[in-house]
Amino acid sequence: MTQPALLGGIEAGGTKTICLIGTGPDDIRAQIQMPTRTADETIPDIVAFFRERSAELGPVARVGLASFGPIDRDPLSATWGHVLTTPKTGWAGTDFAGAVARALDVPVTFDTDVNGAALAEGLWGAAQDVADYAYLTVGTGIGGGIVANNQLVHGAMHPELGHMAVPRDPETDPFEGHCPFHGDCLEGLASGPAIEARWGHPAYDLSADHPAWAMEAQYLSVLAANLILMLSTRRILFGGGVMARNSLFAALRAQTKERLKGYLTVSPFDGDLTDVIMPPGLGKRAGPLGALALAIKANA
Amino acid sequence: MTQPALLGGIEAGGTKTICLIGTGPDDIRAQIQMPTRTADETIPDIVAFFRERSAELGPVARVGLASFGPIDRDPLSATWGHVLTTPKTGWAGTDFAGAVARALDVPVTFDTDVNGAALAEGLWGAAQDVADYAYLTVGTGIGGGIVANNQLVHGAMHPELGHMAVPRDPETDPFEGHCPFHGDCLEGLASGPAIEARWGHPAYDLSADHPAWAMEAQYLSVLAANLILMLSTRRILFGGGVMARNSLFAALRAQTKERLKGYLTVSPFDGDLTDVIMPPGLGKRAGPLGALALAIKANA
């Protein structure tokens, strides 16, 4: 029996980058975490990790690069592999995937960090039994990957669902939002920085009975309900720093249920949504394992 | 060269049902339109049409049944073929597709009217060149079919995107909405009956400079922008009675553009959205041809 090929993964997040070599969650042979600095500083460190560890472990057959966005992941595009407009210093217009592919002389699968995590949840996590689901992260930003018919939804670019329009009642929430583009889009109202800007304290400092949490559940329930109504998606995995507050899940399920108003009478939407809205099965490993998943499900 | 098989199509709408026999848009051999009455009255008329015309034209190899919803179109479900809860008299719980399949002794592909129309637009209409698009109808209700990676998005049931939550400013729009389930969801604010309830006149009676149209464009732009942000969908076809007001398209494009606030800098979202938001290429034929498309793209 042939050994499964050794693969590489790079999860490049807004603040930290994780590189790993392995064949799956139970077989990680090397891993490193570094701060995400500028492209000129970070890419050589990534390349050095793979060169050094491959010399010892053997070559990787493919690298999955799961990046903060927005990115150009269209294999037919002239700017495939590039990071697009981003406020992150020293990254806008960088040919991230191209640089890694050339330096390591391996094929690279390039996608968003959340799309990678969505694939990983389907392969090894909480979405192994469904063909239609979403993986969401609520933290510094709000992002997500959507799988329909067992395939990632890319469209012209990739989902940017954190920026969807949501209802806000100025009487109960006068905060006008934190998104530099849209003000009170979902990310502008419910991301970690939005919570901190509205209440004057970061989310992890707010007590369990702080009104911030009911409001957070309310906004995230719009996202959950809209995903259910627009895509009839069977499962919605909520990860990210803000979701570390576990009590948020019960409130989010209850508010989503309330928002649907009994309109959907079919399973799995007719119950208490315990089987629909849940944390990622891989927890914090969804991100780095997502990079590996991109290498495994190349072109998924 | 073998002839393409003769196929049947049934578009069952809220008020009228169209049956047709043919192989495609340029080869319709028989067609009939009838009012949609109760199931017990309508199904025998449908069956009679196919029996009579098949005796003359030859048997149909498959029937596509494009129905008003909500429906159970999951082939693995025990209630496949059924119309679910519906306010339409005499239809809730009807085994619509099963009755047709048994009476005509042919396989039936069962899906929503909008999913059928979406397939037809991909085969013969305004979405032939894209793999990711949506077909929407704005009329008595608001509904839509979504295609991602060249496949219909079904999820657990089918999209019910008319019921998505949208922002409403009570100062500029005190109308609390017309949806019996959600009040001011999109359908409750922007369907034909909502327009009539808010302004006291049906949409087709309102002059071109009536403020209803700017408001309509505003609400529909939330749907368009959310589809673009959530799915990065390349094309959004807006059909249905309300969209017969052609001037709505320019306003809808402009408001969608304004709503995105320059966040998406990649094609096709960086321009004036003329190539993104447009009418169905098949016009009013999208519905009945959608039924035929279901028979052609069985299990799509």
Image (cartoon, coloured by chain):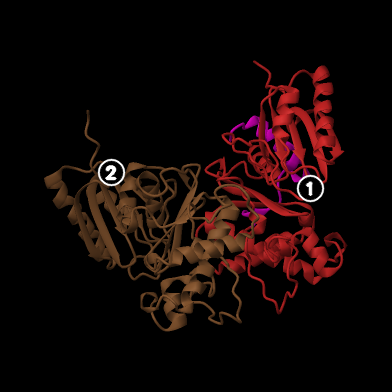
Chain colours: A brown, B red
What residue lies at 73% left-to-right and 67% top-to-bottom? B177
Residue B100 to residue A262: above or below: above
Asked if the stretch drawn in magenta spans residue B280, the answer is yes
Q: Residue furthest left?
A: A56
Residue B180 belongs to the span the image colors magenta: no
The circle on residue B17 is none
Determine the chain carrying the residue at label 2. Answer: A
Instruction: Choose top left, top right, bottom left or bottom right for residue A31.
Output: bottom left
Vertical placement of residue A209 versus A129, above or below: below
Closer to viewer: mark 2 or mark 1 = 1
Residue A48 percent across, percent down from the top left: 18, 56
Q: Position of residue B40 (x, y in %)?
A: 82, 35
Quadrant where the N terminus of chain B sits is top right
Q: Which residue is mark 2?
A: A62
Can you say which quadrant of the picture contains the C terminus of chain B? top right
Is the residue marked by circle 2 packed among few (<14), some (14-19), or many (20+) residues within 10 Å? Answer: many
Is residue B89 shown left or right of residue A41? Answer: right
Q: Residue at x 53, y 63 (%)?
A: A254
Q: Secondary structure at mark 2?
A: loop
- Cα–Cα span, label 2 and label 1: 55 Å
Q: Is residue A76 among the parts visible in the rendering?
A: yes
Residue at screen point 25% across, 59% down: A43
Residue A88 position within the rendered picture, expressed as x and y whole percent measured from the top left: 36, 69
Query: Which residue type carries mark 2?
Result: Arg
Badge 1: residue crowd in 10 Å (few <14, some 14–19, many ≥20): some
Q: Is residue B152 above or below residue A246?
A: above
Q: Which residues are magenta?
A: B274-300
Under mark 1, the amino acid is Lys
> In the image, A132: left or right of B3?
left
Camera sees residue A96: no
